[in-house]
Image (cartoon, rainbow, N blue to C red):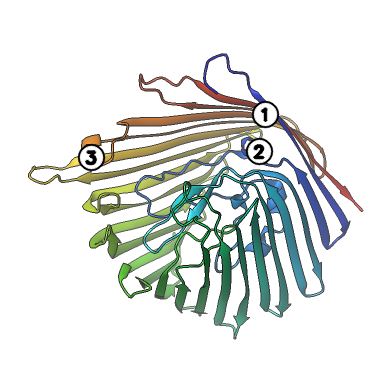
Amino acid sequence: GGSVSSPANLDAGLDVKWTPSATTALDATVNPDFSQIESDVAQIGVNERFALAYPEKRPFFLEGVDLFSTPVQAVYTRAVTSPRWGARGTGKLGATSWTALVAEDRGGGSVILPGPDGSDVAVQDFRSLDFVGRIRHDLGRSFVSFLGADKELEGKGSNRVFGPDFRLNLNEADTVTGQLLYSWSATPDRPDLAAEWDGRRLSGHGADVWWAHTTETWDWAAEYKDFSDGFRADLGFVPQVGFREGYGEVGRTSRPTGFVSRLRTFFFADYIADRDGGLVSQVVAPGVGIDTKYNGFARVELRSERVRAGGVVLPRRRVVFQMNMVPSKAFAGVSLQGAVGEEIDFEGARRGHGGKVAATALFRPGDHLELDLRGEIRWVNLRPAGRTGSRRLFTAHVERLKATWTLTARTYVRLIGQYLGGSRATDLYDEPGEPEDGAFSASALFAYRLNWQSVVFLGYGDNRTLSTDGGLPPGSRQLFLKVSYAFQG
C-alpha cells in the first residue's frame, strides 16, 4: 500500500474436500486465508476490557465446527491467523464422533494475553504448527468427550491444552455440563513483544461447570468457573484468567395468547473475584423477556454493577436491551441491542454516562437481491473536575452495507462497504492520540458454482485509512482467485 500507483497484490488458494464415506470427510487447503470472501463485520474496540471474538467464515475451518464447541472456548480457529496449509478429518463411528485439524500458521495477527481485569494482545511474530482434536462419545442424550490443542512455535515456545468435558441429562428437567482443562506453556523468548514472553513456563487449570433446571413454568441455573493465573489457550479464546466466578439465575415463564406468546421474568446475579479474593466485578439484575408475533423477541435487564477499573471499584447502573423481529418476506429481519446509563472509562478509571447501540436490517426487495445493513455507535460523557456540565470523551461508530445479487442458480455477485470511525477529546486523555480516526474497506466478489460443493471465487479488495486532512487516500488493494473443489469417494 502507499501511493496512488501501488499495484494490487495478487493471491491464490485452493480447498479440496474428499468424502470417502457418508460419515467421514477429509479436507485439505492451501493458502485458505481469504477474508475478502466474507470480510469481518467491524467491531468497536474502544473502552473494551477484553479482546473481541470474530466468527469463523473460512470454509475449511467450518467443517465439523460444532465438535469444537465446549463450555470453555478452548478452540477458536481464528487464532490460526494466516495458514500456509491445513489438513482436517471429521468422522463418526457409531456413537463416537471425532475431528482433528493440523495447520501451519505463518504468524502475524495477535495472541491474547489474558488477566483477571482485562486482556492485552501481543504480535505473533513467528510461524507455528497448530493441532486441535476432539473425540466425543454419546450416551443417549448425554456424552463424554476429550479435547486436545497444541501450538508449537518456530524455534522455541509451545502451548498445550488437554482435558475432558461432559453433558449429563439427569432427567427431563436437569442438565449438568462441565469441562476441566489443564495447560502447559513455554513462552517464547521475545520480551520485546510481551513482558511475560521471557522464556518462562506457565501452567494452570481452567474449569467451568453449569447446572440448568428447566420446566414449563420455572427455570433456574447455577454456574461456577475457576481459572488459575497461568492458564493459557493460545488456540482458543480465553481472554480472562486468574479468577473465580459464581453465577445464578432464576426465571418464571407464562404463555399468554395474543401478540405476546411467551413472557419470562427473571433475576440473575454474578460475582467474579481474583485469586486473592479481590472483587473484579459484581452484577445483580432483574429482567423480562418476551416472544411475540413475527418471530419477535425482546429482553430488558436493569443491571446494577460494581466493576474494578485501575485498582478502584466503581458502581455502574444501566439498562441492557435486545430485540429482533422478522416483519415480512421482503423486510426479512430487524434487530436492535445495546445498553445505556452510567458508564465507566476503563482507561482513566473514571465514572460517566454513555451507552452503545447496534442495529441491523435485512431487505430482500426481490428474488435476486439481498441488502444487509448494520450500524453501531458507542459513546461516553464525563464531567471533568471543577467544571459544570459534561463533555463527550469519545464517540466510536461503524456502518456497513452488504449487497448480494444472485444472477443465476450458479453465480452471484457481492459488494461490501464498511466504515469504522471515531473521535475523542484528546485533552481528557493522559496518552496523546488523534482527535479523529477512520478506516474504510470495500470488496467485490464474483462466485461461480461448478457443482454441489465446488466454487470458483474471483474478488477485489480495497482498504483505506483516514488521513489528517480528512481524505481517504488509496491504501492496500488486493485481487484474488480461489478454487474450492469437492469430490466423493
Amino acid at the residue labelled 1? Gly
Query: In whole angstroms, how far apart are the C-alphas of marks 1 and 3?
Result: 40 Å
Label 1 element class: strand
Disc 2 vs disc 1: Cβ atoms closer than 8 Å? yes
Mark 2 or mark 1: name the one nearer the start of the chain. 2
Does 444 appear above or below 301?
above
Look at mark 3 in the image and give the residue it sits on.
Answer: 392
Q: Is residue 151 visible?
A: yes
Counting from the top left corner in percent of width and height, residue 98 is at 75, 67
On screen, residue 246 versus residue 173, left or right, reads: left
Label 3 and label 2: CA atoms lie apart by 38 Å
Residue 130 horizontal/vertical position (percent)? 68, 55
Residue at the right extreme, as displayed = 489
* Tally of numbered tags: 3
Q: Which mark is residue 430?
A: none
Which residue shows up at 49% across the image and 54% down it?
Answer: 112
Disc 2 crowd, CA 10 A, few/some/many (<14, 14-19, 20+): some
The quarter holding residue 36 reads top right
Camera-side residue of 137 and 87: 87
Question: Foreground: 376 or 388?
Answer: 388
Q: Residue furthest bottom?
A: 170
Residue 202 image point, x, y percent:
52, 66
Q: Secondary structure at mark 2?
A: loop
Can you say whether 409 is above or below 280 in the image? above
In space, the residues marked 2 and 1 are separated at their CA atoms by 10 Å
Q: Is residue 139 left or right of residue 276?
A: right
Q: Residue at x 35, y 19 (%)?
A: 469
Q: Which mark is residue 459?
A: 1
Q: Quadrant of the N terminus?
A: top right
Q: Which label was assigned to residue 34?
A: 2
Whichever of labels 3 and 2 marks the residue nearer the N terminus, that label is: 2
The image shows residue 307 at horizontal and vertical percentages of 29, 62
